[in-house]
Amino acid sequence: MRDDNCIFCKILNGDIPSRKVFEDDDFCVIMDVDPATKGHCLILPKEHYANLLAMPDELAARVLPLAKKVAAHLQETLGCDGINLVQNNGEVAGQTVHHFHMHVIPRYQGGNASDVTWSHSSFTDEEFDAILETIRL
Ligand code: AMP
Ligand code: ZN
């Protein structure tokens, strides 16, 4: 399944160049063209799924082990001191390319840890309880 308007589908199809780090039957790992740090990679499924919620469970279940493998490899080869896994779903969540991807971002001592951060919201105990009632699975 490919989406003709999707830049990652074009990369996976070979229509747009990329720097490929790893490939198996279902995934490709490429270097981010506008990296946060040295070695910033993206894990892409070869099939087009807009985001995590659109992905079949079996495929989604393979993402974390692959992210772990890539993270360990980046740590070994680049000597990074930490790794962020970031995965945005939807425009309001910061997703700009609507083909599922997971960022694997090496972090180095002296870098800016607050690069991956958010501002905080405050709720009363009653509000917390009401939210819990709404979201409890
Ligand atoms: P997100 O904001 O989570 O949707 O992340 C999209 C990521 O895709 C950004 O970090 C971009 O730098 C990256 N990106 C966009 N176009 C390309 C490309 N042609 N090759 C590699 N990475 C890309
Ligand atoms: Zn796509």
Image (cartoon, grey):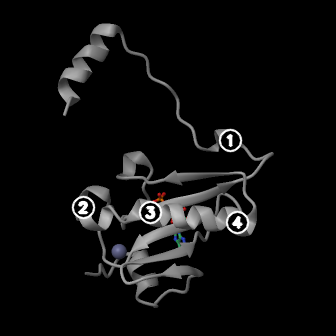
The quadrant of the rendering that contains the C terminus is top left
The residue pinned by badge 1 equals 113
Q: Please report whichever mark, 3 or 2, sits nearer to the chain's N-terminal start.
A: 2
Q: Which residue is mark 3?
A: 65
Marks 1 and 2, the one that precedes in the sequence: 2
Check mark 2 vs ligand 2: CB closer than 8 Å? yes or no: no
Mark 4 touches mark 2? (CB < 8 Å): no
x and y percent of residue 69 in the render?
Answer: 53, 66
Amino acid found under the numbered disc labelled 1: Ala
- Residue of label 2: 57
Q: CA distance from mark 4 to mark 1?
A: 20 Å
- Ligand 2 sits in quadrant: bottom left
Q: Nearer the viewer, mark 4 or mark 1?
A: 4
Cα separation between marks 1 and 3: 24 Å
Q: Which residue is mark 4?
A: 76
Q: Which kind of residue does numbered mark 2 sit on?
A: Asp
How packed mark 2 is, by other alpha carbons closer than 10 Å (few <14, some 14-19, many 20 or more), is: few
How many numbered tags mark residues here?
Answer: 4
